[in-house]
């Protein structure tokens, strides 16, 4: 999990042998099969490196990337705003 620095302690209880809770600074240069990115807007806005740090966070996953957010996504990620299971064109649930 890649989280903004202020949320590390809040999410730390999820850390285990197979789950790492880290900041962008902690994971720069590393790769993981799966990454959950928490609050990408805060990662972008909370860093003087802005979009560069967001790019680093988004590119750590080699197979699967999940994004969790309670605030609006950064403009560059607005295409992810479609709820899981909804069709982009209609907003209706996608067929199975």
Image (cartoon, helix red, strand yellow):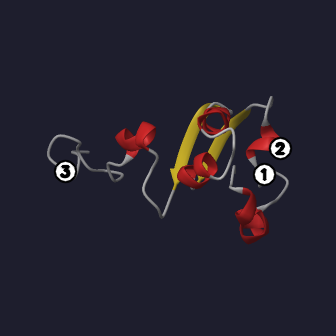
**Which disc number belongs to residue 22?**
1
Q: Going 79% across and 34% down the picture, which residue do you hit?
A: 28
Marks 2 and 3 close (CB-CB < 8 Å) = no
Badge 2 element: helix
Q: Is 41 displayed left or right of 80 in the figure?
A: right
As measured in the structure, the alpha-carbon distance from the residue carrying label 2 to the one carrying label 3 is 37 Å
Q: Residue at x 77, y 55 (%)?
A: 21
Q: Secondary structure at mark 1?
A: loop
Please state if 73 lies on the left or on the right of 49 as rendered. Answer: left
Q: How many C-alpha atoms fall within 10 Å of the one at disc 3: few (<14), some, or many (≥20)?
A: few
The residue carrying pointer 1 sits among few (fewer than 14), some (14 to 19) or many (20 or more) residues within 10 Å by Cα, namely many
Residues at circles 1 and 2 in contact by the CB criterion of under 8 Å: yes
Compute the Cα span from label 1 to label 2. 6 Å
Q: Residue beneath label 2, please?
A: 26
**Mark found first going from the N terminus, 2 or 3:** 2
- For the C terminus, the quadrant is top left
Q: Nearer the viewer, residue 65 or 79?
A: 79
Residue 19, above or below 65: below
* Image disc number at residue 41: none
Q: Is residue 50 left or right of residue 68?
A: right
Say above or below: 38 vs 56.
Answer: below
* Residue occupying image coordinates x 54% and y 46%: 66
- The tag earlier along the polypeptide, 1 or 3, is 1
For the residue carrying disc 2, how many other residues have a C-alpha within 10 Å: few (<14), some (14-19), or many (20+)? Answer: few
What x and y, as percent, mark residue 15? 80, 60
Q: Which image quadrant is residue 76 in?
A: top left
Q: Which residue is mark 3?
A: 91
Give x and y (percent) for residue 36: 62, 49
Q: Quick one: which residue is furthest to the left in this view? A: 90
């Amino acid at each position: 999990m890649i989280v903004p620095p202020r949320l590390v302690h809040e999410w730390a209880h999820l850390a285990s042998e197979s789950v790492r809770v880290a900041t962008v600074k902690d994971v720069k240069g590393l790769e993981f099969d799966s990454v959950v990115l928490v609050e990408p807007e805060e990662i972008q806005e909370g860093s003087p490196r802005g979009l560069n740090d967001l790019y680093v966070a988004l590119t750590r996953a080699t197979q699967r990337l999940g994004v969790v957010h309670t605030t609006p996504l950064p403009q560059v990620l607005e295409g992810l705003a479609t709820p899981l299971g909804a069709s982009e064109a209609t907003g209706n649930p996608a067929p199975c």
